[in-house]
Image (cartoon, rainbow, N blue to C red):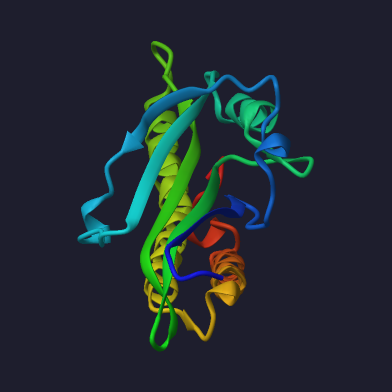
Amino acid sequence: MPTGAVRTVVLAWLAVHAIAAAQPGSLERRESALVPRVPLATHAPAPATYGAIPAGLSLDLGLEHYVVVGRDAATLRRQLDLLGPVSDGRTYDGFHRSSMHWRADWRSDADGCAVTSLEIRLSSTITMPSWVPPPDVAPHLVVDWTRFYQNLLIHEEGHRNITVGHARRALDVLSTLRTPHCDDMQAALSAAFAVIVAAADRENRRYDELTEHGRSQHAVWPP
């Protein structure tokens, strides 16, 4: 390959993580046509807990809701089962989906070929149930639901935190990659990225095992 810059854009990873699953999937299979979607903070800034976001890493973090109605725990449970996000034929109370892209420039030099610039873009969306208590509903139901919602969100944010961590790792690893020849760079970047993706999927699955898919975090309805 002649000396000079080369740019490539690769759609590398699409993953979904639900309250009861953390399996690779696709957006097309994720949702039921019956589920109303209410986008909220679809371009929310990175939470302070992520610290400073390094140059080259772009986070697009979203939160969306589907609406459930009811005056008792059993009705709300049926609504969750009917309207919750769907993946691989299963319905979930909460859901996390993410996709990651990389874009790189590289150039040949006296020592071979080096990455000169790298961009990692991570899109992450959490889907949650939304319930507005009707008038005169039992106060304990509101308390129980609030606790359930908070615990469910904690679980899904756990998946997001894992994914963000691996996006950081991808930026660190790919930006320092070198190959003897620029002809080999795209394959080398793809291979290194695949290793990181596999590690992220393993960690998400392990997270669900350790939390019993959110049960140990009390993300269960009814409580």
For the residue pair 165 and 179, the one nearer the viewer reads as 179
State the count of labels: 0
Q: Residue at point 59% right, 73% down? A: 183
Q: Is residue 152 above or below residue 130?
A: below
Q: Is residue 72 above or below residue 179?
A: above
Q: Is residue 63 above or below residue 177?
A: above
47 relative position to 143: left or right: left
Q: Residue at point 62% right, 71% down? A: 187
Q: Residue at point 48% right, 29% down? A: 65
Q: Quadrant of the N terminus?
A: bottom right
Residue 142 placement (x, y as % from top left):
39, 29
Residue 216 placement (x, y as % from top left):
51, 62
Residue 188: tell me if it is visible.
no
Q: Residue at point 54% right, 81% down? A: 181
For the residue pair 182 and 17, the one nearer the viewer reads as 182
15 relative position to 48: left or right: right
For the residue pair 35 and 179, the one nearer the viewer reads as 179
Q: Residue furthest top?
A: 135
Q: Residue furthest front?
A: 2
For the residue pair 101 and 139, the one nearer the viewer reads as 101
Residue 145 placement (x, y as % from top left):
44, 35
Q: Quadrant of residue 10?
A: bottom right
Q: Residue furthest right?
A: 89
Q: Quadrant of residue 63?
A: top left
Residue 114: tell me if it is visible.
yes
Residue 23 placement (x, y as % from top left):
67, 57
Q: Quadrant of residue 74?
A: top right
Q: Is residue 187 above or below residue 156?
A: below
